[in-house]
Image (cartoon, rainbow, N blue to C red):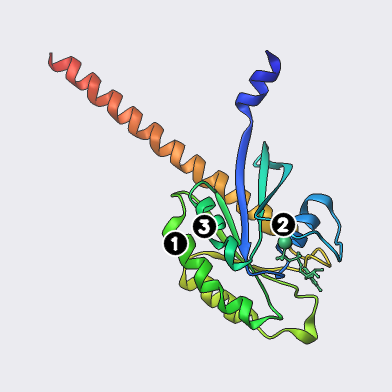
Amino acid sequence: MENKKTNQEEIQFKMLLIGEQAVGKSSLINQYVEGKFELNLLCAAGLDLKKKMITVNNKQVKLMIYDSAGHERYRGLAKNQLHTTKGILIVYDVTERSSFDALTFWLKSYKENAESGSVCLVIGNKIDLKDKRVVSTEEGKNIAQQYGVHFIETSAKDAINVEEAFLNVAKEIMDKENENNNKKNVNKRKENKENNACCIFF
Ligand code: GDP
Ligand code: MG
């Protein structure tokens, strides 16, 4: 009985990492969930799921983090996931221009398929490779702004901004849900008031 109650009260946010192959999607998730960086992570075949409990605004939230394989043939698969996902993290590699160029494909997919109330964050990863950087911070910021989404730069290797990336997305999902609930409550109160008004007249 008690278990059931806990389950009912459990808040779950589904997140999905998309982007080209080898930009560091699996490494970011591994760093965030396991707290480590491994050189030879197994390739995700299609979709992989990792879970993590976190606290957002004093509430326990279970993050369901889906890792997608960036290969062309899996693009459709990630796309299908978009409309059931609250947090979308689109990753590119700051040392690989082609992964940045592919952002427009993923951002358009997001705009076309995302559910309302979802949150999108563009992540420029591998900033520890300073000498190899070919995409500037400004370029990343600009494209994110153009599509009205958030932006952050990370290093899965050195654990820079990894926690922040996931946490900020979770916080914003929570804020949006609260906002929505408040709106619903206001509407309900309005409805009740209107109904009451009817009662007076009849
Ligand atoms: P995915 O295909 O997007 O899941 O990319 P992976 O997580 O498998 O990473 C691809 C390669 O980039 C691997 O060799 C990783 O070790 C490396 N990598 C991932 N993130 C970083 C990072 O932040 N810094 C550096 N230097 N290498 C990284
Ligand atoms: Mg991977």
Depth order, front residue of 165/15:
15
For marks 1 and 3, the one nearer the N-term is 3
114 versus 53 height, above or below: below
Q: Quadrant of ligand 1?
A: bottom right
The image position of residue 11, as x and y in percent, is 61, 35
* Residue type indicated by callout 2: Ala
**Dots 1, 3 in contact, CB < 8 A:** no
Question: Residue at position x 44%, y 61% from top?
Answer: 111
Q: Which mark is residue 79?
A: 3
Q: CA distance from mark 2 to mark 1?
A: 25 Å
* Residue type indicated by callout 3: Lys
Q: Which residue carries the number 2 mark?
A: 44
Q: Quadrant of residue 69?
A: bottom right
Q: CA distance from mark 3 to mark 2?
A: 16 Å
Q: Which residue carries the number 1 mark?
A: 111
Callout 1 environment at 10 Å: few (<14), some (14 to 19), or many (20+)?
some
For marks 3 and 2, the one nearer the N-term is 2
58 versus 202 height, above or below: below
Which quarter of the rendered picture does the C terminus lie within? Answer: top left
Callout 3 environment at 10 Å: few (<14), some (14 to 19), or many (20+)?
some
Element marked by disc 3: helix
For marks 2 and 1, the one nearer the N-term is 2
Question: Residue at position x 78%, y 82% from top?
Answer: 130
Question: Residue at position x 65%, y 19% from top?
Answer: 4
Q: Quadrant of residue 51?
A: top right
- From the Cβ of disc 2, is ligand 2 less than 8 Å away? yes
Q: Is residue 115 left or right of residue 71?
A: left
Q: Is residue 55 left or right of residue 193?
A: right
Q: CA distance from mark 1 to mark 3?
A: 11 Å
Question: Residue at position x 54%, y 46% from top?
Answer: 175
Callout 2 environment at 10 Å: few (<14), some (14 to 19), or many (20+)?
some
Q: Which mark is residue 122?
A: none
